Image (cartoon, helix red, strand yellow):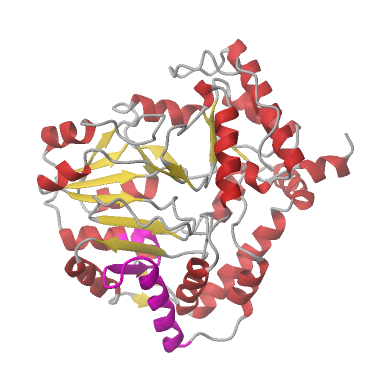
Amino acid sequence: MSLLRWIELMHSRLKLDIGWGDLLWAAMGAPVSRDDTRVAEAVVEKYFAPGRVVIGLSVRTVFDALLSEVGPPPQSSVLMSGINIQNMADIVRAHDLTIEAVDLDLATLAPEPDTLLNAQGRCGARLCVVTQLYGGVSEVWDAAELRKRGVLVVEDAAQAFSGNGYQGLSDADVTLFSFGPIKRRTALGGGVAVFRDPDLAARVRQRLETYDLLKERWFRARAVKYLILKLASTPWVYAGVIRAIAASGRDPDSVIGGAARGFGGQDLLEAIRKQPPRRLVSLMARRIAASPDPEFRRRIGRAFVDALPENAQVGGCVQTSAFWLMPVRASDPVGVIDRLRAAGFDATRGATSLRALAPDQTATAKGLIENVVYVPNPADLSEKERGRLLAVVCAALAEGGREGDHDSGADLSDAGRPTPRPTLPT
């Protein structure tokens, strides 16, 4: 295969979900006034829940402020889904709290019924954080009963916003949505919290207003950075970028992943305890007010998951999904990644900072994180490339299933046996 052909086929596993126009406006648009920001805030409030919305620099920012306002006693327990980004766990521990991690059902990516209630009965937690993973949304069966017990239920839906109307679980006290750099509908940053209690929302908002305001030049520089990253993710450039990083002796996964994240290499609490710049809030409003994700993205994502071998599926029974990422379980994740990259599809085990929070207590979460492979989103590919991606993934899974390498205890023995569907939706 020629170098030119190889470059043409190298598809990134995670593309920035923002157009060139919005990026250029963020980098070079006219100054944003305080009045402009008020208009933008009104747009965000109208979309979610007027009077019950808090806007912050990030989901981490709002969550940290919420913990400060709620003030659980030191060393008390917080119930958390067995998988979340490491920073959320870091924030909990920074408030001198302990984590009671709860395992997940692989089909729904949510705790099974009564799991949260049983854990709460053991540890007496008064705060519960349930994470909606990979863009999927599933019911949290214990939420209503937890609230009756006096537990504050926080739905971390940071990965679930796609502009299709989802505003949070009816039984959640707080729902968190992220507009960070690698999310669907990114605004290159920003978090929104929707509160059940407007008084608690007001208290958290007042706390955030005491933070220093980030300057517009900070956000303009950020936008330039992501302009470069968006250009680098185009198929005819991306392979060259990966080769150049590898030739320098660095790990492409670490370099690319670190560049895309919003709070790398900084003291976490110092970095997040800031007010978002006005330009960021205005861009967030633009992204929220834009047309919803076309339905074909969901159809393509659903069809791709259904066409995978059952034991390779992740979240096969979620109620709905924005398909933020496309995770696949593999008994030999390294082998699957190698085969995909050789076929021109970038794949990784570490596209995000998602972690199993207590791997010794959450066997399913641990097994998923150890076996997961993130592949390019089929909705970002042409019809021909979608079919080719599916064929390569299924062939790689079948080969890994026979060899059985890297098995961490998850039941993946049947992965690869079903025949893949020949076509995906156009």
Task: Give the residue furthest to the right.
Answer: 2
The foreground one among 219 and 51 is: 51
Q: At 29% across and 30% down in the image, what residue appears?
A: 112
| The magenta stretch spans residue 224 | no
The answer to whether residue 53 is magenta is yes
Residue 309, picture quadrant: top right
Give the prevailing secondary structure in the magenta stretch.
helix
> Which quadrant holds the C terminus?
top right
- Nearer to the camera, 420 or 414: 420
Q: Position of residue 258 (x, y in %)?
A: 55, 51
The image shows residue 304 at horizontal and vertical percentages of 60, 34
Q: Is residue 292 above or below residue 213?
A: above
Pick the residue in front: 210 or 346: 346
Which residue is at a point 43% across and 17% down the rendered structure image?
Answer: 409
Counting from the top left corner in percent of width and height, residue 226 is at: 61, 63
Residue 413 higher or lower than 100, as above or below: above
> Which stretch did the figure color magenta?
33-62
Where 120 falls versus 165 (above or below)?
Answer: above
Residue 410: image x %, image y %? 44, 19
